[in-house]
């Protein structure tokens, strides 16, 4: 089983690969696939961290998952991990960023639900 740090490092490898592909004009699905792989790995790292006592590490990884989830339009995941990061961390380093990510996730979820209602009529 991989450690939190190994999972995080691998996630950042995939994020960087997607970012560099985007920066070099890659309009294929490869950057999105790279970001999705980064999200999967970072989620695994964050879930392991949630069982640990280090509030900073939990908040940092949850913030990272929320940001990646927004990037790939997985708004429910972004909401969930922003909330996990805020739990017990009200005065921590990442609170402002986690709250902003949560606001973005909720706004996008609301817009997504409105679109779904319009399509169902």
Image: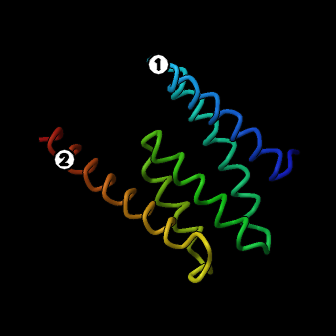
Name the residue: 66% across, 58% down. 61
Q: Is residue 94 above or below residue 101?
A: below
Secondary structure of the residue carrying tag 1 is: loop
Q: Are there few (<14), some (14-19), or many (20+) residues within 10 Å of tag 2?
A: few
Measure the alpha-carbon separation of dots 1 and 2.
Answer: 35 Å
Q: Residue at x 71, y 49 (%)?
A: 44
Residue pointed to by mark 2? 117
Locate residue 19, reporting x and y percent: 56, 31
Drawn side of residue 79 relative to residue 43, left or right = left
Q: Which mark is residue 25?
A: 1
- Please report whichever mark, 1 or 2, sits nearer to the chain's N-terminal start: 1
What label sits on residue 116 in the rendered view?
A: none
Quadrant occupied by the C terminus: top left
- Towards the viewer: 84 or 9: 9
Give the image quarter of residue 51. bottom right
Asked if residue 63 lies left or right of residue 45, the reply is: left
* Residue at point 23%, 43% (across, down): 116
Report the label total.
2
């Amino acid at each position: 089983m991989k450690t939190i740090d190994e999972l995080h490092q691998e996630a950042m490898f995939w994020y960087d690969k997607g970012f560099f592909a985007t920066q070099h004009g890659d309009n294929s699905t490869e950057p999105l696939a790279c970001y999705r792989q980064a999200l999967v790995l970072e989620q695994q790292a964050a879930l392991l961290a949630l069982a640990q006592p280090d509030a900073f590490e939990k908040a940092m990884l949850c913030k990272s998952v929320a940001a990646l989830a927004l990037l790939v339009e997985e708004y429910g995941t972004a909401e969930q991990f922003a909330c996990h990061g805020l739990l017990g961390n009200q005065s921590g380093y990442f609170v402002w960023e986690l709250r902003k990510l949560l606001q973005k996730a909720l706004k996008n979820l609301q817009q997504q639900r409105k679109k779904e209602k319009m399509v169902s009529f």
